Image (spheres, rainbow, N blue to C red):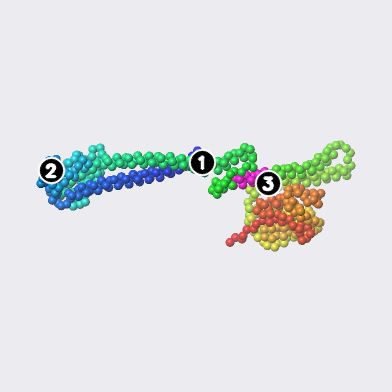
Amino acid sequence: MSLRVRITLVVVVIVAAVVAVVGERVYSAADSELTEEVDLDLRNRVATFVNPRSRGIELRAFIGADPTAGRRGPGGLVDDSDPTEALRAAASREIYARLVDRNGSELLALGGAFTGGLDTSAFPQFGQRAKLSGGSIGPDRARVITVAVGDDLFLQMARSMDELDQSLDGLRIRILLISLVALVAAGAAAWFLAGASLQPISRLARAAERVAQTGDLEHPVDGRGNTEVGRLAESFNTMLSALGASRLQQHRLVMDASHELRTPLASLQTNIDLLRSGREIPDEVRRDIINDLGAEIDELGALVAELVDLAADNRGSETPQRMALVDVVIPVVERQQRRTGSSVTVDVVTEAEVEVRPEAMSRAVRNLLENAAKFAPADSPIRVVVDGGKVTVHDAGSGIPERERLAVFDRFYRVESTRAMPGSGLGLAIVKQVAEQHDGRAYAEASPEGGAAVSIEIPTVPPPS
């Protein structure tokens, strides 16, 4: 089931629940109000027979009389003061009346038969308020009122609810029709609104499918707006840009690597062909060729190792740790001194904590030290300065010309005056990559000691509170 269909169904279910609750409340309110009107009419009709007490006594005399006959006053008019005439007047086509005794036996009926909902034991006492209950007149439901008009004489009146039920049936039909229209309208609105809202997601899905099928990363998705979907589209475009940049870097790395590998491979092939030729080669020349092969193999191995380091992204495999930067630098300096025997001093200007991947940061510092050792004069000291989140390595070599200080961090780039020296030109590129992985930077300057000062600088973190 698609997300659009699910959203539409959820909206329809919610609207259906709301309409059902509102419809039930409206129907119940209408039923209650109409029933109260019927009850009020019945109370008004029996009010004249409750007081005074003599009316109950006179109603006893009415028992057994001809219900169609009436007492006439002067001029043949109905005597309204006669309770029997009032009872006949109260009993009409809609109102049925009867007199019953304490046992519930019917003594007189006017208008027709009906059933009451009260048990005789629940009949009110004389002087008490009339009681209302449900009943029936034939197949129709009715409201029945019972009032005591004497110690053992009770008047009951009933009114059919047929007209009220017809009104409620009409109201029920209207509620159902309105509910149906509301559900259809809500479903249609939800369908179109969901389609409009999910259109950016559909574009994202199509863009992802296009990328998967064609590998094309150059067409961003339209992600206008500050909504969640708009931000998702912007994130998707950012991801495409990062993937495109990564692909471009990989392509450049492969092209540069293939170019750099040609020279040692060609030299190896030449020397091997010379050894295979079978010609007489002086022992001294043979030793030089073998030494050259060893040197080329060592250089090729170092180049491959640096290519692997440069191409690998260890951010996912190494967890950042909060630590003092000097704790990263000191072990690397000590290891460098043991390996090369060179003199390296460490000056700590300011201690600060950083959040780094220790192995990656150690490799960057090691590359800075190896770069300084390679170009510094023999027996000249190398000075490392740690200042907050910055590590700077000073050497007394020939330095880096100002016009080349940015280019030295590019892959395979080597300063023009040192291109005859061994090296791959990847050491400082790795330093730059590590710096960028830690939201920092790498740069080169002139050193007060006459050579180069190459630095890696990353943000520090505030001390814990």
Say if 76 sits above or below 399 in the image: above
Please name the residue that numbered disc 3 is placed on. Answer: 312
Q: Which residues are magenta?
A: 235-247
Q: Is residue 435 visible?
A: yes
Q: Main secondary structure of the magenta part?
A: helix
- Residue 12 in the image: x percent, y percent? 44, 41
Quarter in which the C terminus is drawn? bottom right
Identity of the amino acid at label 1?
Gly
Identity of the amino acid at label 3?
Ala
Please name the residue that numbered disc 1 is placed on. Answer: 195
In magenta stretch: residue 369? no
Chain-order first, disc 1 or disc 3: 1
- Residue 208 in the image: x percent, y percent? 59, 41
Instruction: Between label 2 and label 1, give the one nearer the viewer.
Output: 2
Label 3: few (<14), some or many (≥20) within 10 Å?
few
- Residue 288 in the image: x percent, y percent? 85, 45
Q: Residue at x 41, y 40 (%)?
A: 181
Instruction: Between label 2 and label 3, give the one nearer the viewer.
Output: 2
